[in-house]
Amino acid sequence: MKVGFFVPCYVDALAPEAAISSYELLRRFDIDVEYIEQVACCGLPLTDMGYDRKACAMERNLVKHFSGYDYVVIPSGICTDQVRNHLNAVEQTPEVKHIRETTHDIVDFLHDVLQVKSLPWARFPHKVALHNGCHSLRSLHQARPTELMIPDFSKTEALLKMVDGLEVAYATRRDECCGFGGTFSVWDASCSGQQGLDKVSDYERNGLKYVTSADFSCLLHQQCVARKFGVDIKTYYIAEILNGDAV
């Protein structure tokens, strides 16, 4: 199995430790992992603002360098959603369709493709709040949104329960948006900030000190809000915990 590993621009700039943990975690399994360094951005900011046609050049470059792999893995739910569901500015060739169908974030790849059953190297003896970001929850279908009357499931929780000593917990309003939203946090900063404060305050009321997610973007937003308002939490990207790097 040949796997391309793409690190999105914001992860590369702000959370290299999340990318390193993800890469090392993939290397623990019997797969050929190759780092894709010629792509900087998936085009999400342009798509978010409605500039689909302007995203075309980025998408063409993405398709060029994502080709030739059985799977592409991205340590970011929002960027995975962009590739799988919004790669629309380029012609929908068989090559593009293959990329859209075989691009996964770290959770989907471990749970659905590799079907991992144990993580014997991982230990984190703490109660951890799991935040399923909006894109991962409702676009990548990694867990059951609480508003849907369907059988309960959670791929993220299933993976975390393989970590020795870890107890999964949730905020009271577990599926409520934390306010990141990419460009939304720029154009409507006051609303975004209040949503973030509501989320981290919810953790605090429930005595939760550690937070993880399949989206570092959400963790970045929540950690910044928590620091500003003096809320004592520490965030880890999910691969940091699954790879045994969280301390």
Image (cartoon, rainbow, N blue to C red):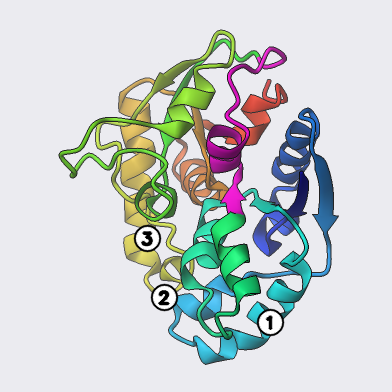
Q: Describe the element under mark 2 as helix, strand or loop.
A: helix
The kind of residue tagged 2 is Trp
- Could you tell me which secondary element the residue under label 3 belongs to? helix
Q: Report the residue at 61% width, 15% height from top.
A: 124
Please name whichever residue, 156 or 202, is drawn nearer the observer in this view of the structure: 156
Position of residue 88 measured from the top left corner of the image (x, y, whole percent): 50, 80
* Dot 3 and dot 2 residues touching (CB under 8 Å): no
Numbered disc 1: secondary structure: helix
Horizontal and vertical percent position of residue 61:
73, 78
* Magenta stretch encompasses residue 96: no
- Which is more N-terminal, label 3 or label 1? 1
Circle 2 crowding by C-alpha within 10 Å: few under 14, some 14–19, many from 20: few
Residue under pointer 3: 192
Q: Is residue 139 visible?
A: yes
* Badge 1: residue crowd in 10 Å (few <14, some 14–19, many ≥20): some
Residue 176, position as x, y percentages in the image: 29, 46
Q: CA distance from mark 3 to mark 2?
A: 9 Å
The one nearer the camera, 100 or 207, is 100
Residue linked to disc 1: 60
Tell me which segment is drawn in magenta: 103-122
Is residue 245 shown above or below 141?
A: above
